[in-house]
Amino acid sequence: MKNIFFLCFLISVELFSQGTELHVKQGSKNHVEFISDAPFGKFSGVTDNIDGYLYWEGNNYTTNSSLYFEVDLKTLDTGIGLRNRHMRENYLHTDKFPDASFKGKITNVTPAAQGSFNVDAEGEMFIHGVTKNIKISGLLTKFGNSDYSIKTNFNIKLSSYKIDIPSIMMVKLSEVIELQLNFNLLAVNKTEGKK
C-alpha cells in the first residue's frame, strides 16, 4: 500500500511540475510594426521576423514564468528601399545592433474573453545597445490544444535607447514610437531547450 501511495505521489509531483513551453510559430502571420507620428501623417516600419519562447509551470501562467522575444531589425520595411537603408544605417545601426529583444516574466493574468487572458509582464527591453526595465501588457489567446497568439502594443522613447530622432524630408518624427506586435506561438515538448 505504501508503494502505491508513493508511486501516486511521484506521478502527481511530475504532473504538477511539468512546464508548458511555447515557441514563436515561424511561417505564420506574425506582425511587428513600429509607428511614429509625423506632421504629414504616420510613419511605420513592419516585419514578420520575430522569434522567441514563453514558458510557465503548472496551470498558472505566472508560476516560474519566463519569456523571451527578439525582432530582426535588419528586416524592418518602411515601404521605400532608400528610407530602409537610412533607417538601418543612420539611426538603428543594425550592423552593430541587429536585434531588439525583450526578456522577462509574467507578473499578472486576468481572464478576458473566452480562451483569452490579459497578461502583464515585466523585464528588460534591449534596443540599440541599451537595456531598460519596462512593463508591458498584452492579450494571450489559446486556440485548441497547442496554438496560441499574443497581441501587445506599447510605447518607447527613442532617446531612452540613445537613438537619434529620424528625419524624413527634413521633418523630424516623434520621439515616442508605438510598437505593435501580433504573433503566433506553438506548444512544444517539455524536453526541448529554452533560449
Image (cartoon, rainbow, N blue to C red):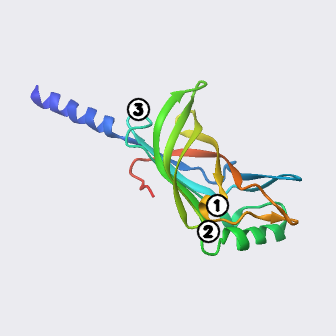
Q: Of the residues under marks 1 and 3, which one precedes in the sequence?
A: 3
Residue located at (70% from left, 69% from top): 91
**Eye-nearest disc, 3 or 2:** 2
Determine whether label 1 and label 2 are within 8 Å by CB.
Answer: no
Query: How far is mark 1 from mark 2, CA to CA?
Result: 18 Å
The tag earlier along the polypeptide, 3 or 2, is 3
Q: CA distance from mark 3 to mark 2?
A: 36 Å
| Amino acid type, label 3 | Asn
Q: Is residue 83 found left or right of 97 in the rendered image?
A: right
Where on the picture, by quarter, is residue 86? Answer: bottom right
The residue carrying pointer 1 sits among few (fewer than 14), some (14 to 19) or many (20 or more) residues within 10 Å by Cα, namely few
Secondary structure beneath dot 3 equals: loop
| Residue nearest the viewer, comparing 80 with 37 | 37
Does residue 70 appear in this view? yes
For the point 60% across and 66% down, the residue is 128
- Closest to the camera, between mark 1 and mark 3, is 1
> What residue does disc 2 label?
98
